[in-house]
Amino acid sequence: MADALLSRRDFVKMAGLGTASLALPGCMTLSKPLAGKRPPNILLIVSDDQGYNDLGCYGSGEVKTPNLDRLADAGVRLTSFYVTWPACTPSRGGLLTGRYPQRNGTYDMYRNYLVNYDHRYTQDEYAVSPEMILGMDTREVLIPRALKQAGYASGIFGKWDLGQLHRFLPLQRGFDEFYGFTNTGVDYWTHERYGIHSMRRGDKLTTEDKGTYTTDLFRRETLRFITRHKDRPFFCYVPFNAPHGGSNLKRPGPQAPVEYIRKHYGEYDPKDADTKRAKRMRYMAAITYMDEAIGRMLELLDELGVAENTIVIFFSDNGGGSAADNGPLRANKGDLFEGGVRVPAIVRWPGVIPARTVCSEFLTSMDIFPMLCSAAGIRPPKDVVLDGFDMTSVLAGRQKSPRKEMFWQRRSDKAARVGNFKWVESSGGSGLFDLSNDIGEQNDLSKQKPDVLRRVKGRFAAWKRLMAEAEPRRPFRDF
Protein backbone atom coordinates (compact mmCIF):
# COMPACT_ATOMS: atom_id res chain seq x y z
CA MET A 1 0.00 0.00 0.00
CA ALA A 2 1.20 3.52 -0.74
CA ASP A 3 1.11 4.62 2.89
CA ALA A 4 2.63 1.46 4.35
CA LEU A 5 5.63 2.42 6.52
CA LEU A 6 8.56 0.39 7.83
CA SER A 7 8.93 -1.17 11.22
CA ARG A 8 11.52 0.29 13.60
CA ARG A 9 13.81 -2.70 12.95
CA ASP A 10 13.57 -2.08 9.20
CA PHE A 11 14.31 1.60 9.80
CA VAL A 12 17.51 0.79 11.68
CA LYS A 13 18.58 -1.50 8.87
CA MET A 14 18.02 1.13 6.22
CA ALA A 15 19.34 4.11 8.18
CA GLY A 16 22.67 2.39 8.76
CA LEU A 17 23.02 0.61 5.44
CA GLY A 18 26.79 0.25 5.73
CA THR A 19 26.47 -2.48 8.36
CA ALA A 20 22.85 -3.54 8.26
CA SER A 21 22.70 -3.90 4.49
CA LEU A 22 24.72 -7.10 4.73
CA ALA A 23 21.49 -8.68 5.89
CA LEU A 24 19.47 -7.33 3.00
CA PRO A 25 19.45 -9.51 -0.13
CA GLY A 26 21.65 -8.09 -2.86
CA CYS A 27 22.72 -4.96 -0.98
CA MET A 28 26.45 -5.50 -0.59
CA THR A 29 27.15 -8.57 -2.68
CA LEU A 30 30.68 -8.28 -4.07
CA SER A 31 31.18 -9.07 -7.74
CA LYS A 32 34.68 -10.50 -8.09
CA PRO A 33 36.46 -9.70 -11.37
CA LEU A 34 36.52 -12.58 -13.79
CA ALA A 35 39.79 -14.52 -13.85
CA GLY A 36 42.22 -12.85 -16.23
CA LYS A 37 40.01 -9.77 -16.62
CA ARG A 38 40.89 -6.50 -14.97
CA PRO A 39 38.29 -4.56 -12.97
CA PRO A 40 36.22 -2.06 -14.92
CA ASN A 41 37.41 1.49 -15.46
CA ILE A 42 35.19 4.19 -13.96
CA LEU A 43 34.32 7.56 -15.49
CA LEU A 44 32.26 9.54 -12.99
CA ILE A 45 30.93 12.84 -14.39
CA VAL A 46 29.07 15.40 -12.28
CA SER A 47 27.48 18.57 -13.64
CA ASP A 48 26.90 21.59 -11.41
CA ASP A 49 23.37 22.93 -10.81
CA GLN A 50 21.79 21.23 -13.84
CA GLY A 51 18.00 21.12 -13.81
CA TYR A 52 16.07 17.84 -13.75
CA ASN A 53 14.49 18.61 -17.12
CA ASP A 54 17.58 20.09 -18.78
CA LEU A 55 18.57 17.09 -20.89
CA GLY A 56 16.94 15.88 -24.06
CA CYS A 57 16.55 12.38 -22.65
CA TYR A 58 14.59 13.79 -19.70
CA GLY A 59 12.13 15.54 -21.96
CA SER A 60 13.69 18.89 -22.76
CA GLY A 61 12.91 20.11 -26.25
CA GLU A 62 15.08 23.17 -25.66
CA VAL A 63 18.47 22.08 -24.28
CA LYS A 64 20.72 20.24 -26.74
CA THR A 65 22.45 17.24 -25.12
CA PRO A 66 22.97 14.69 -27.94
CA ASN A 67 25.91 12.92 -26.27
CA LEU A 68 24.24 12.49 -22.90
CA ASP A 69 21.12 11.33 -24.75
CA ARG A 70 23.20 8.66 -26.51
CA LEU A 71 24.75 7.68 -23.19
CA ALA A 72 21.25 7.15 -21.78
CA ASP A 73 20.30 5.16 -24.87
CA ALA A 74 23.24 2.83 -24.19
CA GLY A 75 22.46 2.40 -20.49
CA VAL A 76 19.88 3.25 -17.87
CA ARG A 77 18.22 6.58 -17.10
CA LEU A 78 17.28 7.06 -13.45
CA THR A 79 14.11 8.98 -12.58
CA SER A 80 14.10 8.71 -8.76
CA PHE A 81 17.74 9.44 -7.92
CA TYR A 82 18.60 11.72 -5.01
CA VAL A 83 21.60 13.62 -3.69
CA THR A 84 22.32 14.22 -0.01
CA TRP A 85 22.00 18.03 0.07
CA PRO A 86 20.46 20.70 -2.18
CA ALA A 87 23.77 22.52 -2.84
CA CYS A 88 27.38 21.85 -3.71
CA THR A 89 29.70 20.96 -0.84
CA PRO A 90 27.71 18.46 1.26
CA SER A 91 26.35 16.82 -1.89
CA ARG A 92 29.89 16.12 -3.13
CA GLY A 93 30.96 14.91 0.29
CA GLY A 94 28.03 12.49 0.40
CA LEU A 95 28.99 11.12 -3.01
CA LEU A 96 32.69 10.58 -2.27
CA THR A 97 32.20 9.09 1.22
CA GLY A 98 28.95 7.18 0.66
CA ARG A 99 27.70 8.73 3.91
CA TYR A 100 25.12 11.26 5.01
CA PRO A 101 26.53 14.77 5.45
CA GLN A 102 25.46 14.59 9.10
CA ARG A 103 27.62 11.47 9.50
CA ASN A 104 30.73 12.62 7.59
CA GLY A 105 30.71 16.08 9.19
CA THR A 106 30.31 18.19 6.04
CA TYR A 107 26.69 19.27 6.37
CA ASP A 108 27.01 22.86 5.22
CA MET A 109 28.96 24.93 2.72
CA TYR A 110 32.59 26.00 2.94
CA ARG A 111 31.79 29.49 1.75
CA ASN A 112 32.52 33.16 2.40
CA TYR A 113 29.23 35.04 2.45
CA LEU A 114 30.75 38.48 1.84
CA VAL A 115 31.01 37.36 -1.77
CA ASN A 116 27.24 37.87 -1.95
CA TYR A 117 28.04 41.58 -1.91
CA ASP A 118 30.87 41.37 -4.46
CA HIS A 119 33.54 41.87 -1.83
CA ARG A 120 36.99 41.64 -3.41
CA TYR A 121 39.15 39.64 -1.03
CA THR A 122 42.81 40.35 -0.46
CA GLN A 123 45.12 37.35 -0.22
CA ASP A 124 45.50 37.98 3.52
CA GLU A 125 41.73 38.09 4.08
CA TYR A 126 41.12 34.98 2.01
CA ALA A 127 43.87 33.01 3.76
CA VAL A 128 42.00 33.04 7.09
CA SER A 129 38.43 32.99 5.77
CA PRO A 130 36.06 30.03 6.36
CA GLU A 131 36.15 29.17 2.66
CA MET A 132 39.90 28.66 2.89
CA ILE A 133 40.32 26.93 6.24
CA LEU A 134 37.33 24.53 6.39
CA GLY A 135 37.59 21.03 4.95
CA MET A 136 36.34 17.46 5.14
CA ASP A 137 37.54 15.53 8.18
CA THR A 138 40.74 13.69 7.27
CA ARG A 139 39.46 10.50 8.89
CA GLU A 140 36.86 10.13 6.16
CA VAL A 141 37.67 7.53 3.49
CA LEU A 142 36.89 8.66 -0.06
CA ILE A 143 36.22 6.50 -3.14
CA PRO A 144 39.75 6.77 -4.66
CA ARG A 145 41.41 5.60 -1.43
CA ALA A 146 39.17 2.55 -1.31
CA LEU A 147 39.89 1.73 -4.97
CA LYS A 148 43.66 1.80 -4.43
CA GLN A 149 43.48 -1.71 -2.97
CA ALA A 150 42.34 -2.88 -6.42
CA GLY A 151 45.21 -1.08 -8.20
CA TYR A 152 43.25 1.86 -9.61
CA ALA A 153 44.87 5.07 -10.82
CA SER A 154 42.63 7.96 -9.75
CA GLY A 155 42.32 11.46 -11.16
CA ILE A 156 40.03 14.42 -10.59
CA PHE A 157 39.60 17.21 -13.14
CA GLY A 158 37.25 20.02 -12.20
CA LYS A 159 35.60 21.27 -9.01
CA TRP A 160 36.81 19.81 -5.69
CA ASP A 161 34.97 21.88 -3.03
CA LEU A 162 35.99 19.74 -0.02
CA GLY A 163 38.76 21.90 1.44
CA GLN A 164 41.68 24.05 0.35
CA LEU A 165 44.35 23.61 3.02
CA HIS A 166 47.08 21.15 2.05
CA ARG A 167 45.74 18.28 4.18
CA PHE A 168 42.31 18.54 2.53
CA LEU A 169 43.41 18.59 -1.13
CA PRO A 170 42.67 15.70 -3.54
CA LEU A 171 46.22 14.28 -3.59
CA GLN A 172 46.05 13.83 0.18
CA ARG A 173 42.62 12.13 -0.09
CA GLY A 174 43.57 9.27 -2.40
CA PHE A 175 43.73 10.85 -5.86
CA ASP A 176 46.92 10.51 -7.90
CA GLU A 177 46.28 13.50 -10.18
CA PHE A 178 44.36 16.74 -9.87
CA TYR A 179 43.74 19.73 -12.10
CA GLY A 180 40.96 22.11 -11.19
CA PHE A 181 39.79 24.49 -8.50
CA THR A 182 39.22 23.74 -4.85
CA ASN A 183 36.52 26.23 -3.79
CA THR A 184 32.87 26.30 -4.75
CA GLY A 185 33.07 28.24 -8.03
CA VAL A 186 35.23 30.38 -10.36
CA ASP A 187 34.94 32.58 -13.38
CA TYR A 188 35.09 30.31 -16.46
CA TRP A 189 37.89 32.32 -18.11
CA THR A 190 39.89 34.14 -15.43
CA HIS A 191 39.67 31.21 -12.97
CA GLU A 192 39.28 33.73 -10.18
CA ARG A 193 36.85 33.73 -7.29
CA TYR A 194 36.18 37.31 -6.21
CA GLY A 195 39.69 38.44 -7.05
CA ILE A 196 41.48 35.28 -5.85
CA HIS A 197 43.05 33.03 -8.51
CA SER A 198 41.90 29.49 -7.81
CA MET A 199 43.13 26.99 -10.43
CA ARG A 200 45.54 24.28 -9.25
CA ARG A 201 47.64 21.52 -10.71
CA GLY A 202 48.25 19.01 -7.97
CA ASP A 203 48.75 20.95 -4.75
CA LYS A 204 50.02 24.13 -6.40
CA LEU A 205 48.17 27.15 -7.72
CA THR A 206 48.79 27.74 -11.43
CA THR A 207 48.01 30.47 -13.96
CA GLU A 208 49.27 28.41 -16.94
CA ASP A 209 45.83 28.31 -18.58
CA LYS A 210 44.35 31.64 -17.51
CA GLY A 211 42.01 32.89 -20.23
CA THR A 212 40.92 29.40 -21.35
CA TYR A 213 37.32 28.28 -20.83
CA THR A 214 37.19 25.83 -17.93
CA THR A 215 35.17 23.16 -19.74
CA ASP A 216 37.92 22.95 -22.37
CA LEU A 217 40.53 22.51 -19.65
CA PHE A 218 38.69 19.73 -17.83
CA ARG A 219 38.05 17.95 -21.13
CA ARG A 220 41.75 18.19 -22.06
CA GLU A 221 42.99 16.90 -18.73
CA THR A 222 40.49 14.03 -18.69
CA LEU A 223 41.48 12.87 -22.18
CA ARG A 224 45.16 12.94 -21.21
CA PHE A 225 44.51 10.96 -18.02
CA ILE A 226 42.46 8.28 -19.76
CA THR A 227 45.08 7.92 -22.49
CA ARG A 228 47.92 7.60 -19.96
CA HIS A 229 46.12 4.96 -17.92
CA LYS A 230 44.36 2.96 -20.62
CA ASP A 231 46.36 -0.16 -19.72
CA ARG A 232 45.35 -0.30 -16.05
CA PRO A 233 42.12 0.21 -14.10
CA PHE A 234 41.36 3.91 -13.69
CA PHE A 235 38.90 6.02 -11.72
CA CYS A 236 38.38 9.36 -13.46
CA TYR A 237 36.21 11.86 -11.61
CA VAL A 238 35.12 14.85 -13.72
CA PRO A 239 33.10 17.38 -11.68
CA PHE A 240 32.43 20.15 -14.19
CA ASN A 241 31.58 23.65 -12.96
CA ALA A 242 29.08 23.93 -15.84
CA PRO A 243 26.37 25.16 -15.83
CA HIS A 244 26.95 26.83 -12.42
CA GLY A 245 27.10 30.61 -12.52
CA GLY A 246 30.51 32.24 -12.87
CA SER A 247 31.65 32.96 -9.32
CA ASN A 248 33.41 36.28 -9.66
CA LEU A 249 32.75 39.96 -9.05
CA LYS A 250 29.32 41.13 -10.24
CA ARG A 251 28.28 37.45 -10.46
CA PRO A 252 27.73 37.12 -14.20
CA GLY A 253 25.59 33.99 -13.97
CA PRO A 254 26.18 31.02 -16.33
CA GLN A 255 29.01 31.62 -18.80
CA ALA A 256 29.55 30.43 -22.38
CA PRO A 257 31.36 31.78 -25.47
CA VAL A 258 29.17 34.30 -27.29
CA GLU A 259 29.61 32.73 -30.72
CA TYR A 260 28.79 29.32 -29.28
CA ILE A 261 25.57 30.68 -27.80
CA ARG A 262 24.58 32.14 -31.16
CA LYS A 263 25.48 28.95 -33.01
CA HIS A 264 23.26 26.72 -30.88
CA TYR A 265 20.59 29.00 -29.44
CA GLY A 266 20.10 31.95 -31.78
CA GLU A 267 20.63 35.69 -31.62
CA TYR A 268 22.36 36.86 -28.45
CA ASP A 269 23.42 40.39 -27.53
CA PRO A 270 25.90 40.68 -24.62
CA LYS A 271 24.45 44.10 -23.84
CA ASP A 272 21.29 42.32 -22.68
CA ALA A 273 23.22 39.84 -20.53
CA ASP A 274 21.17 40.47 -17.38
CA THR A 275 17.81 39.52 -18.86
CA LYS A 276 16.17 36.26 -17.85
CA ARG A 277 16.28 34.97 -21.44
CA ALA A 278 19.97 35.84 -21.86
CA LYS A 279 20.87 33.96 -18.68
CA ARG A 280 18.85 30.98 -19.85
CA MET A 281 20.67 31.01 -23.20
CA ARG A 282 24.09 31.11 -21.53
CA TYR A 283 23.02 28.34 -19.17
CA MET A 284 21.86 26.11 -22.02
CA ALA A 285 25.02 26.82 -24.03
CA ALA A 286 27.18 25.90 -21.04
CA ILE A 287 25.35 22.54 -20.85
CA THR A 288 25.71 21.88 -24.58
CA TYR A 289 29.42 22.79 -24.47
CA MET A 290 29.84 20.34 -21.56
CA ASP A 291 27.87 17.73 -23.51
CA GLU A 292 30.34 18.05 -26.41
CA ALA A 293 33.24 17.54 -23.99
CA ILE A 294 31.56 14.42 -22.61
CA GLY A 295 31.02 13.19 -26.15
CA ARG A 296 34.76 13.46 -26.84
CA MET A 297 35.49 11.45 -23.67
CA LEU A 298 33.13 8.70 -24.80
CA GLU A 299 34.73 8.71 -28.26
CA LEU A 300 38.17 8.27 -26.71
CA LEU A 301 37.00 5.26 -24.71
CA ASP A 302 35.92 3.71 -28.02
CA GLU A 303 39.16 4.63 -29.79
CA LEU A 304 41.26 3.08 -27.03
CA GLY A 305 39.17 -0.08 -27.01
CA VAL A 306 38.19 0.25 -23.33
CA ALA A 307 34.55 1.38 -23.58
CA GLU A 308 33.18 -2.12 -23.05
CA ASN A 309 35.02 -2.34 -19.73
CA THR A 310 34.21 1.14 -18.44
CA ILE A 311 31.39 2.20 -16.12
CA VAL A 312 30.19 5.70 -17.02
CA ILE A 313 28.09 7.57 -14.47
CA PHE A 314 26.58 11.01 -14.93
CA PHE A 315 24.41 13.12 -12.62
CA SER A 316 23.94 16.67 -11.35
CA ASP A 317 25.23 17.60 -7.89
CA ASN A 318 21.87 19.13 -6.94
CA GLY A 319 18.85 20.77 -8.51
CA GLY A 320 19.16 23.61 -10.97
CA GLY A 321 19.18 27.28 -10.01
CA SER A 322 17.22 30.24 -11.32
CA ALA A 323 18.17 29.69 -15.00
CA ALA A 324 17.28 25.99 -14.91
CA ASP A 325 14.17 23.96 -15.69
CA ASN A 326 13.48 21.51 -12.86
CA GLY A 327 10.03 20.58 -14.15
CA PRO A 328 7.91 18.75 -13.21
CA LEU A 329 9.56 19.04 -9.79
CA ARG A 330 8.89 21.77 -7.25
CA ALA A 331 11.50 24.41 -6.33
CA ASN A 332 15.21 24.71 -7.10
CA LYS A 333 18.74 24.42 -5.81
CA GLY A 334 18.86 25.13 -2.10
CA ASP A 335 15.37 23.77 -1.42
CA LEU A 336 14.46 20.42 0.13
CA PHE A 337 11.51 19.94 -2.19
CA GLU A 338 12.17 17.51 -5.05
CA GLY A 339 13.58 20.22 -7.32
CA GLY A 340 16.52 20.68 -4.97
CA VAL A 341 17.46 17.06 -4.27
CA ARG A 342 16.10 14.79 -7.04
CA VAL A 343 18.46 14.99 -10.02
CA PRO A 344 18.95 13.54 -13.51
CA ALA A 345 21.28 10.53 -13.56
CA ILE A 346 22.54 8.08 -16.20
CA VAL A 347 24.65 4.92 -15.86
CA ARG A 348 26.21 2.91 -18.70
CA TRP A 349 27.88 -0.41 -17.88
CA PRO A 350 28.14 -2.67 -20.95
CA GLY A 351 27.33 -6.31 -20.28
CA VAL A 352 25.87 -5.56 -16.84
CA ILE A 353 23.17 -2.90 -17.31
CA PRO A 354 20.80 -3.34 -20.27
CA ALA A 355 20.71 -0.55 -22.83
CA ARG A 356 17.70 1.72 -23.44
CA THR A 357 16.21 1.16 -19.97
CA VAL A 358 14.64 3.42 -17.36
CA CYS A 359 14.90 2.82 -13.61
CA SER A 360 12.29 4.44 -11.37
CA GLU A 361 13.59 2.79 -8.20
CA PHE A 362 14.47 4.87 -5.12
CA LEU A 363 18.28 5.36 -5.31
CA THR A 364 20.84 7.90 -4.12
CA SER A 365 24.37 9.17 -4.72
CA MET A 366 25.42 7.36 -1.51
CA ASP A 367 24.83 4.08 -3.37
CA ILE A 368 27.68 4.81 -5.82
CA PHE A 369 30.56 4.13 -3.38
CA PRO A 370 29.46 0.57 -2.46
CA MET A 371 28.58 -0.17 -6.11
CA LEU A 372 32.07 0.80 -7.24
CA CYS A 373 33.69 -1.25 -4.48
CA SER A 374 31.65 -4.24 -5.61
CA ALA A 375 32.57 -3.65 -9.26
CA ALA A 376 36.25 -3.53 -8.33
CA GLY A 377 35.94 -6.78 -6.37
CA ILE A 378 36.88 -5.19 -3.05
CA ARG A 379 35.16 -4.78 0.28
CA PRO A 380 34.17 -1.33 1.53
CA PRO A 381 36.55 0.17 4.09
CA LYS A 382 36.64 -1.72 7.36
CA ASP A 383 34.81 -0.11 10.28
CA VAL A 384 33.28 2.58 8.06
CA VAL A 385 29.47 2.77 8.21
CA LEU A 386 28.14 3.47 4.72
CA ASP A 387 24.64 4.82 4.17
CA GLY A 388 24.29 3.29 0.72
CA PHE A 389 24.21 -0.15 -0.87
CA ASP A 390 25.44 -1.80 -4.07
CA MET A 391 22.75 -0.78 -6.54
CA THR A 392 24.06 -2.86 -9.46
CA SER A 393 21.24 -5.40 -9.41
CA VAL A 394 18.66 -2.62 -9.18
CA LEU A 395 20.13 -0.79 -12.19
CA ALA A 396 20.25 -4.07 -14.09
CA GLY A 397 16.55 -4.63 -13.41
CA ARG A 398 17.08 -7.80 -11.37
CA GLN A 399 15.66 -6.52 -8.07
CA LYS A 400 13.77 -3.72 -6.42
CA SER A 401 15.63 -1.13 -4.42
CA PRO A 402 15.85 -2.06 -0.73
CA ARG A 403 15.94 1.65 0.13
CA LYS A 404 12.71 2.80 1.72
CA GLU A 405 13.70 6.12 3.24
CA MET A 406 16.06 9.08 3.08
CA PHE A 407 16.52 12.21 5.12
CA TRP A 408 17.79 15.74 4.56
CA GLN A 409 18.56 18.73 6.75
CA ARG A 410 19.86 22.14 5.75
CA ARG A 411 20.10 24.22 8.91
CA SER A 412 16.50 24.52 10.15
CA ASP A 413 15.00 23.12 6.93
CA LYS A 414 14.10 19.42 7.21
CA ALA A 415 12.76 16.74 4.91
CA ALA A 416 12.20 12.99 4.81
CA ARG A 417 11.06 10.52 2.20
CA VAL A 418 9.58 7.32 3.65
CA GLY A 419 8.19 4.99 1.03
CA ASN A 420 6.31 7.24 -1.37
CA PHE A 421 5.61 9.90 1.24
CA LYS A 422 7.72 13.06 1.39
CA TRP A 423 7.57 15.49 4.31
CA VAL A 424 9.13 18.95 4.12
CA GLU A 425 9.33 21.58 6.84
CA SER A 426 11.20 24.61 5.58
CA SER A 427 11.33 28.37 5.17
CA GLY A 428 10.20 27.83 1.56
CA GLY A 429 7.11 25.84 2.47
CA SER A 430 5.98 22.73 4.32
CA GLY A 431 3.72 19.75 3.83
CA LEU A 432 3.26 16.03 3.37
CA PHE A 433 3.09 14.75 -0.20
CA ASP A 434 2.47 11.41 -1.92
CA LEU A 435 5.15 11.20 -4.62
CA SER A 436 3.45 8.24 -6.29
CA ASN A 437 0.85 10.62 -7.74
CA ASP A 438 2.17 14.08 -6.86
CA ILE A 439 5.80 14.37 -7.96
CA GLY A 440 5.37 18.14 -8.08
CA GLU A 441 4.51 18.27 -4.34
CA GLN A 442 1.39 20.37 -4.86
CA ASN A 443 -1.18 18.57 -2.69
CA ASP A 444 -0.42 18.84 1.04
CA LEU A 445 -1.85 15.79 2.84
CA SER A 446 -0.91 16.85 6.37
CA LYS A 447 -4.52 17.26 7.50
CA GLN A 448 -5.87 14.24 5.61
CA LYS A 449 -3.17 11.86 6.88
CA PRO A 450 -2.06 13.03 10.32
CA ASP A 451 -1.00 9.51 11.35
CA VAL A 452 1.32 9.23 8.35
CA LEU A 453 2.73 12.70 9.03
CA ARG A 454 3.42 11.77 12.66
CA ARG A 455 5.15 8.55 11.70
CA VAL A 456 7.30 10.17 8.99
CA LYS A 457 8.38 12.84 11.48
CA GLY A 458 9.16 10.03 13.90
CA ARG A 459 11.46 8.45 11.31
CA PHE A 460 13.22 11.77 10.89
CA ALA A 461 13.67 12.09 14.67
CA ALA A 462 15.08 8.55 14.84
CA TRP A 463 17.53 9.37 12.03
CA LYS A 464 18.63 12.49 13.87
CA ARG A 465 19.38 10.40 16.95
CA LEU A 466 21.33 7.92 14.84
CA MET A 467 23.43 10.69 13.31
CA ALA A 468 24.05 12.22 16.75
CA GLU A 469 25.32 8.86 18.01
CA ALA A 470 27.80 8.50 15.13
CA GLU A 471 31.48 9.19 15.79
CA PRO A 472 31.74 12.99 15.42
CA ARG A 473 33.50 14.53 12.43
CA ARG A 474 34.82 18.02 11.70
CA PRO A 475 34.33 20.79 10.68
CA PHE A 476 30.85 21.64 11.98
CA ARG A 477 30.13 19.09 14.70
CA ASP A 478 30.48 20.24 18.31
CA PHE A 479 32.79 17.83 20.15
Image (cartoon, rainbow, N blue to C red):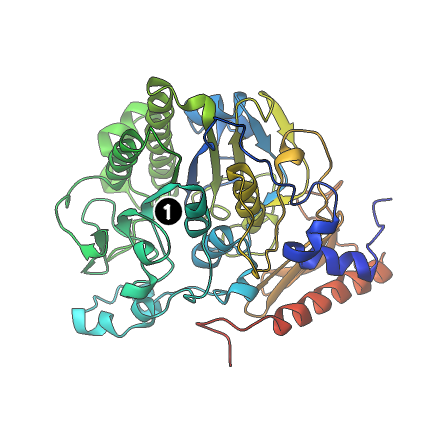
Q: Amino acid at mark 1?
A: His
The residue lying at 59 percent from left, 20 percent from top is 356
Placement of 263 over or under 205, stated as above or below:
above
Q: Quadrant of residue 120?
A: bottom left
Most extreme residue toward the left is 208
The residue located at (53%, 47%) in the rendering is 369
* Rendering coords of residue 25 (x, y %): 74, 42
Q: Quick one: 301 or 463, which is closer to the camera?
A: 301
Depth order, front residue of 445/147? 147
Residue 230 on image: x %, y %: 33, 29
**Which of 160/231 is in front?**
231
Residue 332 lies, in percent from the top left, at: 52, 50
**101 relative to 436, above or below:** below
Side of 360 where 203 appears, left or right: left
Residue where numbered disc 1 is placed: 244
Q: Eyeballing the image, is 412 above or below 453? A: below
Q: Count every numbered label the image shows and give the total.
A: 1
Q: Is residue 375 visible?
A: yes
Q: Looking at the rendering, in which quadrant would you find the N terminus? A: top right
Residue drawn 84% across the image and 50% down it: 3
Image quadrant assignment for residue 336: bottom right
Q: Is residue 407 left or right of residue 168?
A: right
Residue 318, image x and y in percent?
Answer: 49, 48
| Label 1 Cα neighbours within 10 Å, binned few <14 / some 14-19 / many ≥20 | many
Q: Secondary structure at mark 1?
A: loop
Residue 447 in sight = no
Q: Looking at the image, which residue sits at the far front?
A: 35
Left or right: residue 335 versus residue 261 is right
Q: Is residue 196 left or right of residue 350?
A: left
